[in-house]
Amino acid sequence: MLIARKIAYNVAVSSFSKILSTALALVSIGLITRYLGKEGFGNYATALAFLSFFSAVADLGLYSASTREISRPGADEKKIMGNIFAFRAGVSLLVLILSPIVVIFFSYPLEVKEAIIIVAASFLFSSSYQILNGVFQKNLAMDKVAISELIGKFFQVLIIFLAVKFDLGFLWIMTSLLFCMILNFILVCLWSRKYIVFKLKLSFPYIGKFLKESYPIGIAVFITFIYFKLDTILLSIIKSSADVGIYNAAYKVIENITFFPAMIIGLIFPIMSKNIFSDTDRFRDISNKTYKFLWIFIVPLLVGTLFLSDGIVKVIGGTSFSESSGVLRILIFALVFIFFGNFSNAILIAGNRQKKLLVVLSIAAIFNVAANLIFIPRYSYLAAAVISALTEMIVVIGTFSLIYKEFKYFPSMKKVGRIILAGAFMAGFIYLFYEINFFLLGLSSIGIYLAALWALRAIKTEEITSIISKRRMDEYGELP
């Protein structure tokens, strides 16, 4: 199958599955916010922040590095995956064992501490199956991962619905995550056998050699956690659970959209890794198209959120979370930078510049922690939101500067002005018809944006037809 068509198929299926997963996630948030209220939802968000903490501590760069290595020509996939999967599972089990000790150092209510331990058990399964994602990335089969996550999310929402209906309490809400991760783990393991069957191995000399390459990525992941999720933990310590709830009602909206840039970059990353040195023209072409694709999605998200945040928050959390709409308007700028940050980080990792990436992320993390400690006590969740946006901006400026310095590459801005102009038409439409039904306004404004893209020729017909053309795969090169 032509690579362009295969990528298009994966994007289509993955996008559809992820959109449904996101819709289900927002439904679950709506159920939880109305059931638990601000304080209870704050406790829920605090426990989930520890999932990110565990993921960051145990990552060690294994996922990105293993994906990169199995994408190299002549890679011994079975040896790589056998060792990395076994090692990651062992580290995850250690996290579960140590989690009761970790929670001792926090003055949270007992049920929050119990929820954190449940989260640690969930992490044991989620971290193990995520290592296998590299296999699906290499074979351009991330649609299967997306479908498995959709099934898991549906199962999770069902448990949450039952917990709310029968008033089973906070811990059953948390347990739904554990069941979701177990199901995801089973499905991904079964589907991965189509592409690779490996035996668990644990060669410590091999792991040690691998970690020498991966540890900068692992440190980068941990630093990313610091500026991406530590604000929630700091809010839970410095301010009240209600403040955490208000902040995270908005943050969860943003968080559930970040799947898209990660998914797109995940599909492109193996191709970037293969061609960044061997075929720079192809690398630049793919990177430029990806960059333009990101702009096409960023513009309507930014415009729609700025104008419709009140309605979005009302749908998600109800009237009791009205303060979250202002937070959402700030955090949407963080999301814009996250899109570009995913893109630039992938290029640096593909080009083996993870140590220099680490410097940029460290600067961003230091700024984030210092600013949060200074301003959260006074300005609470508003400070956390502004600092999140500024932190992501620092990452993008730093990483794009690095890319230009190291590879003499800066993504093409061709047609970006037309995409922004299409967004202006969308904004004008929303402004003029703001009083109509929220859902009708949202759908209509997207239609206006797409029509404007077409009319302004921001998207050409040949760009679409090239995806479904019958040219041979060898025009693009074999799959990495």
Image (cartoon, grey):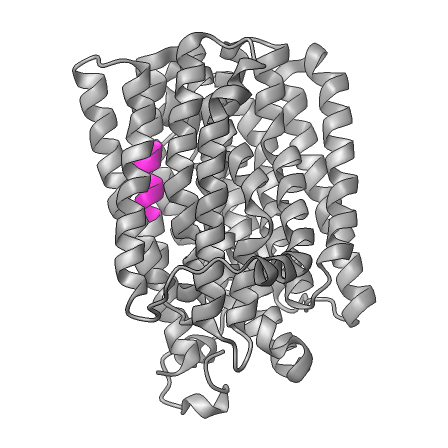
* Closer-to-camera residue (65/202): 202
> Picture coordinates of residue 352 (x, y %)?
70, 65
Residue drawn where x is 47% and y is 16% of the image: 42
Residue drawn where x is 45% and y is 16% of the image: 113
* Closer-to-camera residue (74/380): 74
The main secondary structure of the magenta stretch is helix
Say which quarter of the image contains residue 102. Answer: top right
> Picture coordinates of residue 20 (x, y %)?
30, 46
Residue drawn where x is 37% and y is 85% of the image: 469
Name the outermost residue toward the right: 405
* Closer-to-camera residue (85/420): 85
> Picture coordinates of residue 158 (x, y %)?
20, 32
Describe residue 265's horizontal placement relative to residue 354 as left or right. left
- Image quarter where the N terminus lies is bottom left
Query: Count of labels shown?
Result: 0
Within the magenta stretch, is there residue 171?
Answer: no
- Position of residue 413 relative to residue 390, above or below, is below
Describe residue 166's horizontal placement relative to residue 322 as left or right. left
Residue drawn where x is 78% and y is 51% of the image: 398
Residue interval drawn in magenta: 19-26
Let me know if residue 422 appears in the view. no
Let me know if residue 351 appears in the view. yes
* Closer-to-camera residue (171/249): 171
Say which quarter of the image contains residue 343. Answer: bottom right
- Position of residue 347 relative to residue 63, above or below, is below
> Picture coordinates of residue 105 (x, y %)?
58, 14
